[in-house]
Image (cartoon, helix red, strand yellow):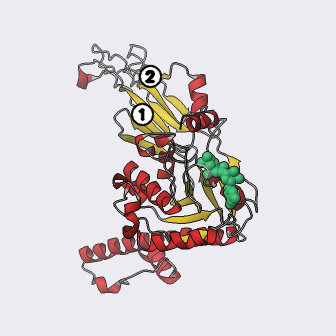
Amino acid sequence: MVHISRICLRKYGNFVDNLRLYVRGGGGGMGLPRLGGQGGNGGDVWVVAKKNMTLKRIKDKYPLKRFVGGSGGNSSVRALKGEKGTDVEVPAPVGIAVTTDDGRIVGDLNEEGDRVLVAKGGSGGSLYSAFEPTKGQAKHIRLDLKLIADLGLVGFPNAGKSSLLTALSNATPQVASYAFTTLRPEIGKVMYPDYKQISIADLPGLIEGAYMNKGMGHKFLKHVERTKQLLFVVDVCGFQLASKTPFRSAFEAVQLLSKELELYKEEVASKPAILVVNKMDLPDAEDKLAELKEQLKNPEEFSDLLPGDMIPKNYMTFRHVVPVSAMTGLGIDHLKSCIRQSLDEEATLKSSDVLQEKLLRLQMKAVTLGKPPSCFPTRVQASDHTDQHMLKDEYV
Ligand SMILES: Nc1nc2c(ncn2[C@@H]2O[C@H](COP(=O)(O)OP(=O)(O)OP(=O)(O)O)[C@@H](O)[C@H]2O)c(=O)[nH]1
Ligand SMILES: [Mg+2]
């Protein structure tokens, strides 16, 4: 275990994925009671998403990790309205969540140029405040980096996640390093013949107790939170972390991984998932696969194989169980089409949900306007272009 964590540290030790900063809005300027002059407001502090920015770069460039807005100008005889203090921008990478110290989310920065106000400047003194200015907001914030990918690879170490990513993205070997730090998790792009691209995040292996922050624990589990779906990867022959830790069969590995996700956050464990059974080139793989499939059909029956506290509340249901060999390429094309199918299904469901919601709003509007709701369709299919146009052009 010590050995494994040392390897992880060596591989990812330089990776900064969260940063705590002190931010304070500038104080307001003094009012001028004699002439009724108003002081300028203090400058605000914003966090702004910039291209090619990394948390490590912020840390290096601003070692004090302190950002303070400019003070508002005092009201004077020459300028009754004091000038506003200068706003300060904290440059941040794309794909971060900004949270307060107590975990409240202030905002997400998902695209370049997205900005979130983190500390408002104080108000300038005016008639309403007896010409006394107020101080700017002051607090600590956290910038939390989360990878954004369509799928996240989840598995114990050595299951072959990285090999799988290499095999999947071989067609267009565009396995781009994730541009946040020098040593970091990677995102691979898989290209389809119709030029649709999907991204898969390769993460370090989880170990039992990851939910308690063992191994690389939370640092990487949180990345899984933002992926749309999960790609579980298990070694068909099972897995043993070290000679002193118990051997886990592929079935046990699947359940233990589900439990780790569930204990971390239940909504992560309820994401759509595909199970990849890797290393099908090894001897006896077919028999072991058959056994695994049998066990997955009735997981409750085999739950006594697991330690009591590691039985998941809900057994994961996989959209596809795909045997592959990342080494020989066996089953990789089939896996690609399963991934595509699963993501497309999800997208269709989502757009159909959005249309249903719009329809519901229209029906409610119709009722308030006194129109019979029957003049609206009762159900909308995402693929039904007539309905989509009708909603878009005529009513929305
Ligand atoms: N026989 C066989 N070996 C494989 C296959 N896929 C991966 N391996 C081997 O399994 C070992 C681990 O592969 P990785 O891709 O590094 O595994 P990983 O899941 O990324 O491991 P961590 O990054 O430690 O979590 C390597 O020695 C690979 O060569 C496969 O399909 N068949
Ligand atoms: Mg790996």
Mark 2, Cα crowd under 10 Å, few <14 / some 14-19 / many 20+, is: many
- Image quadrant assignment for residue 170: bottom right
| Residue at point 37%, 55% (across, down) | 266
Residue sitting nearer the eye, 180 or 273:
273
Do the numbered discs 1 and 2 sit on residues whose CB atoms are within 8 Å? no
Q: Secondary structure at mark 2?
A: loop
Question: Which x, y percent locates residue 185?
Answer: 61, 44
Instruction: Please identify the quadrant where the C terminus is shown.
Output: bottom left
Residue at mark 1 to residue at mark 2: CA–CA distance: 21 Å
Q: Secondary structure at mark 1?
A: strand
Pointer 1: what residue? 118
Q: Residue furthest front?
A: 243
Pointer 2: what residue? 83
357 is higher (above) or lower (below) than 200: below
Kindly tell me whether mark 1's CB lies below 8 Å from ligand 2.
no
Question: Which x, y percent locates residue 96?
Answer: 51, 42
Question: Which x, y percent locates residue 62?
Answer: 56, 22
Q: Earlier in the sequence, mark 1 or mark 2?
A: 2
- Image quadrant assignment for residue 374: bottom left
